[in-house]
Image (spheres, grey):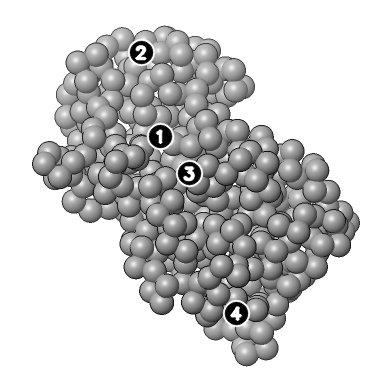
Amino acid sequence: MSEANLEKRPGKVISYPVAGIPPGSYFSETVYLDNRFVLAAPEMPFSREIISALQDWEFKEVFSAGEPLDDYAANIAGKNENIEPTAATLLSDSEKIIRAENFYAGFQKYVEGLFTQVATKNELDFKSVAEKVKTACDIVREDRRFILRVQKNNQSSPNENYLASHAVKSTIIAIIIGSYLKLPNHRLIELGVAALLHEIGMIKLPPQIYLSKRALQPQERKAILTHPILGYNILKSFDFPLTVTLAALEHHERENGAGYPQKLTGDKISLYAKIIAVACSYEALSSHRPHKEAKDGYTGMLELLKNEGKQYDETIIRALVFSLSIYPIGLYVLLSSGRKGQVVDVNPENPRYPVVQVFGELTPDGKNKILETSQEGVSIVRPLSREEIGQA
């Protein structure tokens, strides 16, 4: 990480060797793990736990425009009321945040390699993919809140592999939905494999078609409509289970029969395909694409909740909402108190009122304040953009 990559941060950003940071010190400005990942805000002590977690994950340095101080400077927090939100929540969660970041990056790299392997060597093995997905299922179930926040903080770049990125994000959401529906472990793994490979048919199409920023020609639109069939044939040729191959074939089918390629309706669509349809539709709504800007997670969730034309299975939509909340985990929000914050967990009783980390407020023991929003107390006014929270 060079200083040039952090030019937009206030002040002169310099690197600090992790081993040289005094345990318990307070940085006078936000601390960054890399160009995208906020590690700590000024009100958070840089504890032995954070240092140990960074060393365990072999991070040698961090970056900040501030300097480590012996004591927390309260006037700094007051001066920077619009401080950039930290990706770590509670101090004790720092290791899980770092683990989530590493998992996400590693999973993305694995999927890119997997797609390249299929495209160039025509090789694909169900057992090896299933083993990778099994590990992903375990991590997602254990660290769901942290992975969703890391996923939210990872913004698309021009050089990003769109198919791999979409596959990773959709798989994580599908696993979360499947866990809410209490699918047994072997079915959850099958679902994860199906979600990971649901767009595999796209690799048989020219990339200029599915990455196009222009309106597609009629023949190009017809070509796009063939990718579920291409994906089904690819997976079938490698002896993938029927449940997985059907999910790839049917993930664009819709409850009202308006989907493709077979115009199936209702109970004729397989369960995995129904889940993937909701997962990848939500992911597509809330992510940048070559031809459109992303909606925030709240707007994307509302659009799915409307379920115009009854395209999606209502049970699956409910599972998504109760797993992520209407204001999804990772979303930056404005509170009725006037404070800014980030959604960090769901309220299992009411998805309209999630749990929020409040920026610029501490508990008596010095930890970041975590608030359960409610109708009677502090509630969410609206989502905030990255620009509104001052994050590059």
In-front residue for pair 389/179: 179
Q: State which mark lies toward you, 3 or 2.
A: 3
Query: Residue under circle 4?
Result: 263
Above or below: residue 8 compared with residue 68: below
Measuring 43% from the left and 52% from the top, which residue is drawn there?
Answer: 320
Residue 259 position within the rendered picture, expressed as x and y whole percent measured from the top left = 56, 77
Q: Is residue 171 in view?
A: yes
Q: State which mark lies toward you, 2 or 1.
A: 1
Q: Amino acid at mark 3?
A: Tyr
Measuring 25% from the left and 17% from the top, which residue is drawn there?
Answer: 366
**CA–CA distance in space, label 2 to label 1:** 19 Å
Quarter occupied by residue 102 = top right
**CA–CA distance in space, label 4 to label 1:** 43 Å
Query: Residue under circle 2?
Result: 25
Residue 341 position within the rendered picture, expressed as x and y whole percent measured from the top left = 27, 39
**CA–CA distance in space, label 3 to label 1:** 25 Å
